[in-house]
Amino acid sequence: MRKNLIIADKTIDIYQAESPCAPMVILNSYQRVGEELLEQCAELGCPDFTLVEISGLVWNDEMSPWTIPSFSRDEPPFGGKADDYLGLLIGEILPAVKAALDTEPRSILLAGYSLAGLFALYAATKSDLFAAVASCSGSMWFPGFMEYIKQQDITTLPKHIYFSLGDREARTKNEILRTVEDNTKELAAYLSQGGIDTVFERNKGNHFHQVALRTAKGIRWILSHTE
C-alpha cells in the first residue's frame, strides 16, 4: 500500500509493509526512486519493511552538516542545514508518517545515497532514533567529516553501519572527490575497531551506476542485521 504526504515542501512516499510492526526504512532521495528500489529489494530477497522515501529536498543545503563552498562551476554551495532538516524529520515528518500508518515500527533505519549517505551517518551522531544506517556511495569526501566522526563518542552510534562505493568513484581529477574511497575505507575500519558491526562493499562503476540496486543492497544488509 502506498500513501503520500506533503510536509514543508517535501514529498513523502510511504510504501507500507504487510506486517504492521515491520521495520521502517527512511530514505532521503535526490529524486523519487521508490518503486524501482522496492523491485530491486524484492529481487534481493529483502525482509518485509516499510519504506518512507523523502524527496523534494534542498539537496546541497539540507544534506550537508556545515557550510562549504562549491568546488564546481555547476554545483551550488553547501548550505550546512542538516541539523534543521533533521529537526523537521524527527519533529514533524516521522510523527505524521506514524499517524498515517496508525502503527509503530519495531525499529527505524536510515539510508541514503551520495550526500544523503553522508547525512545518514551524521544524523546518527545527533539522534539515537536509528537502529542502523546504510551509507550507499556516501559523500565521505566532505571536508572535515572524518575529523568530526573521530571526535564523537561512537558508543552512541547505531550498532550496524553499512558503507558502499563504486570502484570508479575515486577516479576523478577533483582533489576533494578523489578522497572518497580512502575516507570511506578509513571510516569503516575506525568504526569497526570501535566495536560497531560495519561493512564496506565495493560495487562496479562510477557514482551514478545502478543507484537503486546499490541502495537496495545497503537496505538488505541493515535489515538483515537488525531485528
Image: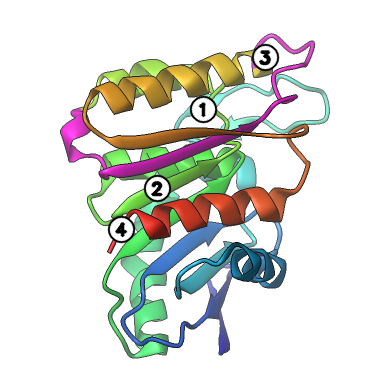
SS of the residue under disc 3: helix
In the rendered image, residue 25 lying in the magenta stretch gets the answer no
What residue does disc 1 label?
67
Residue displayed at 79% across by 10% down? 173
Q: Is residue 82 above or below residue 149?
A: below
Q: Nearer the viewer, mark 1 or mark 2?
A: 2
SS of the residue under disc 2: strand
Q: Which residues are magenta?
A: 153-176
Q: Amino acid at mark 4?
A: Thr
Q: CA distance from mark 4 to mark 1?
A: 33 Å
Residue displayed at 77% across by 33% down? 205
**Which numbered disc, 1 or 3, marks the residue that appears first in the sequence?**
1
99 or 150, nearer to the observer: 150
Q: Is residue 12 above or below residue 223?
A: below
Mark 4 neighbour class, 10 Å CA radius: few under 14, some 14 to 19, many 20 or more: some
Residue 58 visible to the viewer:
no
Count of all numbered marks drawn on residues in the image: 4
Q: CA distance from mark 1 to mark 2?
A: 23 Å
**Which disc number belongs to residue 226?**
4
What residue does disc 3 label?
178
Residue 174 visible to the viewer:
yes
**Which numbered disc, 4 or 1, marks the residue that appears first in the sequence?**
1
Q: Identify the image's colour scheme: rainbow, by chain, secondary structure or one colour.
A: rainbow
Picture quarter containing residue 126? Answer: top left
Q: CA distance from mark 2 to mark 3?
A: 23 Å
Q: CA distance from mark 2 to mark 4?
A: 11 Å
Left-right relation of 98 to 14: left
Left-right relation of 97 to 217: left
